[in-house]
Structure formats: structure tokens, C-alpha cells
Amino acid sequence: MLDNIENLKIISALHKTSKPYGKVESRKAHSFGIRVKGSVQYTFADKTFTVNEGEMIFLPKGSSYEYKKVSEEDTVVTMINAEGDFGEAAPSVYSIKDFYDAEYIMYHFVDLWRFGNQSQRYQCISLMYSLLSYISNLDAQQYQDKKRLNLIEPAIKYLQRHIYDCDMRINELHLMCGISHTYFRQIFIAKFGMSPKNYVQSKRFSYAKSIIDSGEFSTVKELAALVGYKDPLYFGKVFKQHYGVSPEGFNQ
């Protein structure tokens, strides 16, 4: 996380076309690589990042990595090198497309730093702190999202084990997490893009479809029980709503 940087000092800035491939051993300065055009993949000892147009990679001082172009077009980067107390900041990638001065920092920062007067250089430093503030807010939001997701982890684990159980009660999942049904539903939708009911239904119907495809069932009642429904009539009704055809006629 880039939220504890002190004594930031810009030492150089350049706008360049990246080489198709390169290797860096123990980087000499902290660097912010803002991708202006194309995509580049960075490979560290324990992780790999792909940085696309409008994204920024932070490369800590002392880091070693390889990079290679992964897009057909030329790859252009604005590179800002800095010193300061960066704490234990690790390599990381951020989208800065929504940063209010993203276009300016991508296309004009280098000229302002290299050819501007002292007042304009102070503007560059101010701009960097604004960017770091924006990134810090992104980190904080991601941290909050992770905390929220941790709240519903007991229910997610329960779902993974019991999603095909006929006795599973979807409306009681929030009780496992100690939060309200409304808040549980809100977090669940943010993670999975659908309500708990629709999530369970989609998983069950997908499983039912695979059973039908395999031919390993003889009746709709048997199929319904296998995927978590006690009432075969209700199962047949919602299955048809989902796929537009009944279970009996699915492969006909």
C-alpha cells in the first residue's frame, strides 16, 4: 500500500517507448510507471502483473524483475523516479483512469518537470501527492471491501458444502454472519453479481443440466432431489423459467 510515503523527492521523469523485453536487477530508485499506450507484463520472483493503458505500476527501489510487451502496438510509458521513505511498499498496479489529472500526468508531467521553473516543479510534486492520495483511497476502499467480504465468509463456506441440500435455508444465511439479511444480501451481490437465491438457483440448475446431459437420472423427482429441491413440480417450473424448456425436454 502507498499510504505511508514521507519525504517524497522526484529525481527524474521521462516519456519513452518501452523495449519489447527487458530485465532489471535491483532497481536504483522507486518508480511509478504510467502506461500511456499498449500493455506490458512484469514478472517478479513471486508475482506477475500486466499493466494496460491507463494503469500505473509501482516499482520499489531494490526490486528485480523482467518485463515484456504483450500488445501488438508500441508501448509508451511515463516513468517518474523518486526517493523518500516508502516504508514496506511492494510492487503493485493501480488504474488511474478516474484520477482527475490522469491525462495531464500521462502526457505533460515530464515536460513540466524537465523544462519548467522551480514553481512548476513544485506543481509536479503537488500533483504526485494528489495521485498518491487518490491511490491511498483506492487501497482503503479495497481494504474495506475485503473486510466486508470476510463478514460473509462463514455463509460462503456453508454454501460450498451444502448448496445441493434440500434443507438448506437461504434466508437464514445472514444469521451465520451475525449481520442483517439486507446487509448480507448487499455484500453478497457485490461479490457475486447476483442475489443469494439466484446464485444458489444458477448453481443447482447448472448441476441439473450436467446430470441430464449424462443421462444419470430416471425421473424429475429424482433429479430435483439430487440438486436440492424437495418439490419436483416447483423445480420443473423454475427450471423451465431458467432454460425455457422443461427438464424432460431439455435434450430433445
Image (cartoon, rainbow, N blue to C red):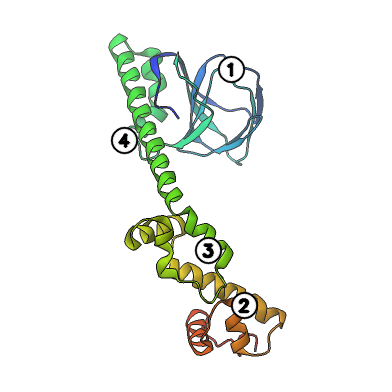
Q: Which residue is mark 3?
A: 159
Dot 1 or dot 4: first in sequence order is 1
Query: Which residue occupies 38% across, 23% down?
Result: 109
Whether 195 is drawn above or below 62: the answer is below
Q: Position of residue 85 (x, y in %)?
A: 44, 15
Q: Which mark is on residue 62?
A: 1
Dot 4 or dot 2: first in sequence order is 4
Amino acid carrying mark 2 in the image: Lys
Amino acid carrying mark 3 in the image: Leu
Query: Which residue occupies 51% across, 84% down?
Result: 235
Q: Pointers 4 and 3 in contact (CB under 8 A)?
A: no
Q: Which residue is mark 4?
A: 100
How far apart marks 3 and 1 lie (CA) works out to: 44 Å
Query: Which residue occupies 54% across, 86% down?
Result: 245
Q: Which residue is mark 2?
A: 209
How far apart marks 2 and 1 lie (CA) works out to: 53 Å
Amino acid carrying mark 1 in the image: Gly
How far apart marks 4 and 3 lie (CA) works out to: 41 Å
